[in-house]
Image: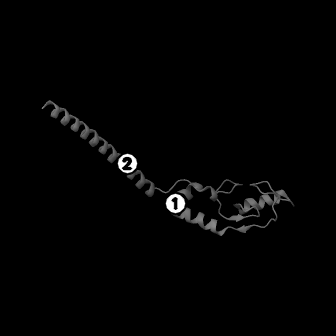
Amino acid sequence: AFDLQIEAARGEGKAGVDDQRKEEEAVTVKKLRSLDREDKERPHQQIPPSFTCPITCEVMLDPVITADGYSYERLAIQKWLRKKGKHPVSPQTGLPLDHRRVVPNISLRNSIEEFFKERPQLRDEQA
């Protein structure tokens, strides 16, 4: 009879631990779901680095691509090229540029505009 009581006590103890573990897991799952829901509701606060001009360190409004393949704010790179004279170098790599032409980076401009359209409060912070 005594052995049966010990086994019953062990079973209750194990069940109690299992119940406690299940409760802790349920709380953890609720917290994770809550964080996930908050994350989906809140726009991401970080602006992608590719949206920032390496010269001005500001979000680009009129991004252009140069011979080095990097994108820059149009006015900033034009000023850079004028300042460097006949033999301009890349602001990113320091290597000579093959030419001084700049080409609009329409895809990047559209991505930036779309990003801020979905997150107008971030655009306000940039202004």
Which element is circle 2 on?
helix
Residue 78: percent from left, percent from top: 77, 62
Q: How many marks?
A: 2
Residue 107 against residue 85 in the figure, above or below: below
Q: Which residue is located at x 63 percent, y 58 percent?
A: 50
* Side (left or right) of 113 relative to 40: right
Residues at marks 1 and 2 touching, judged by CB atoms closer than 8 Å = no
Mark 1 and mark 2: span between their CA atoms? 25 Å
The residue indicated by pointer 2 is 31
Q: Quadrant of the C terminus?
A: bottom right
Please identify the quarter of the rendering in which residue 108 is found: bottom right
Nearest the eye: 86 or 97: 97
Residue 55: percent from left, percent from top: 72, 54
Question: Dot 1, crowdedness within 10 Å: few (<14), some or many (≥20)?
Answer: some
Which element is circle 1 on?
loop
Q: Quadrant of the N terminus?
A: top left
Please identify the quarter of the rendering in which residue 53 is found: bottom right
Residue 88: percent from left, percent from top: 83, 59
Please identify the quarter of the rendering in which residue 100 is found: bottom right
Nearest the eye: 127 or 117: 117
Residue 67: assigned label: none
Residue 119: assigned label: 1
Residue furthest to the left in view is: 1
Nearest to the eye among marks 1 and 2: give it: 2
The kind of residue tagged 1 is Arg
Q: Which residue is located at x 73 percent, y 68 percent?
A: 103
* Side (left or right) of 44 relative to 37: right
- The numbered mark, 1 or 2, whose residue comes first in the sequence reads 2
The kind of residue tagged 2 is Lys
Question: Dot 2, crowdedness within 10 Å: few (<14), some or many (≥20)?
Answer: few
Q: Which residue is located at x 53 percent, y 64 percent?
A: 117
